Amino acid sequence: MTLWINCGIIALISFLSGSIPLWKKLDEKYLRIGISFGAGTLLGAAFLSFLPEILHSGIHEAGIYILLGFITLYILEKFVMVHPCEETHCNVHNIGLSAYVGLSIHSLTDGFILGSATLLPSLSGVALLAILGHKGPASFSLSNILLYSHYSNKKVWVLNSIFAIITPIGALISYYLLQEISEEMIMICVSFSLGTFLHIATSDLLPEIHKAEKWKLVNLFALLLGILIIYLFGGHSH
C-alpha cells in the first residue's frame, strides 16, 4: 500500500510541475531554486541514508556497484538523454522528442530505485523525497522544452500526463520483480541506486546551480534545506 501511495504522490507532483509552463511563465531563477533543493535531497539520501544502510548490511564490493550505477547513468546521459535545464532556452526546434525519450528513460530509472528502496522500510520515505526533489524541476523543464519545440498545448498536456506515470510504472515493476530475490541482491540494487543519485546530483544538478548569477545564497539555502529534510526524515537511522 505504501508503494501505491508513493507512486500516486510522484505522479501528482510530476503532472502539476509539468503543467505550470502551460499556465504561467516563471523566471529561470525559481527553477534553479528547485534544482538546488533537488540536489540537496539527492546528496542527503545518498550519504545519510543509502550509504549507512549499505555499510550496515556488510555487503561485499559495494563500491563496485555504486560505481557501476554512476557509470551506467553517465553512459545513458552521454548517448541517450538530454539534460533538461540546458535545453530549455535552445533555439533548435527538433530537440523535443529526444528530450522526452531521454528524460522518460531517466524517469524509469527513478522508478526502479523507488521500487527497490521500498523493500527496505528505512529507505522508502527517503527515496520518495529524493526522487520528488528533482522530479518536479525535470517535469517543469520538459514541458518548457516541448513548448519551445512548437508542440501544441494539447500535445504537451498528453505527453506530460504520460511522463507523470513512468516513474510509478518503473517502481511497481521493480518492486514486484525484486520481492522474490535475496536481501543481498536488494542491497546490490540499493548500491546501484546510490551511484545514480550521486551522478544526478553532481553531474546534472550542481553544475546548474553554479550557473546562477543571482540568488546564490538562496540556492545554497535550498541545497542545505534539502539535505536537512532528508536528515530529519530518517537519514540518521544507523
Image: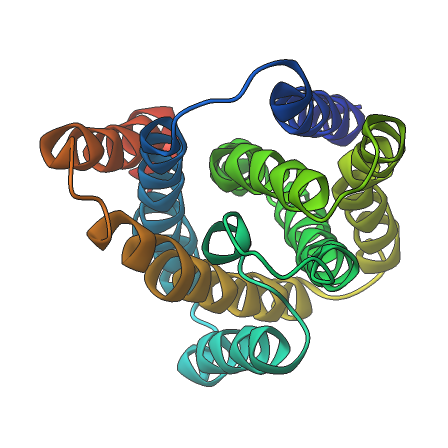
Q: Residue at x 72, y 25 (%)?
A: 15
Q: Return the x and y of residue 235 as percentages of the image width and height.
A: 34, 38
Q: Position of residue 94 (x, y in %)?
A: 74, 62
Which sits in the foreground, 171 or 84? 84
Q: Is 237 above or below relative to 48?
A: above
Residue ID at (57%, 41%): 141
Q: Residue furthest top?
A: 23
Give whichever of 74, 111 is nearer the camera.
Answer: 74
Q: Is residue 19 visible?
A: yes
Quarter assignment of residue 78: bottom right
Q: Is residue 215 left or right of residue 12?
A: left
Quadrant including the C terminus = top left
Whether residue 237 is visible, yes or no, is: no
Task: Please determine whether, in this image, residue 221 is positioned above or below residue 178.
Answer: above
Could you say which quadrant of the image residue 34 lies in? Answer: top left
Task: Count the labels in the image.
Answer: 0
Figure coloring: rainbow
Question: Where does residue 76 sit, x and y in percent of width and height?
Answer: 63, 76
- Asked if 205 appears above or below 82 in the picture, the reply is above
Front-most of residues 43 and 15: 15
Q: As drawn, is 210 to the left or to the right of 143?
A: left
Is the residue 207 above or below the residue 145 in the image?
A: below
Q: Residue at x 36, y 64 (%)?
A: 55
x and y percentages locating residue 178 in the rendered image: 80, 58
Q: Residue at x 68, y 21 (%)?
A: 22
Q: The N terminus appears in which quarter of the rendering?
A: top right
Q: Residue furthest left?
A: 217
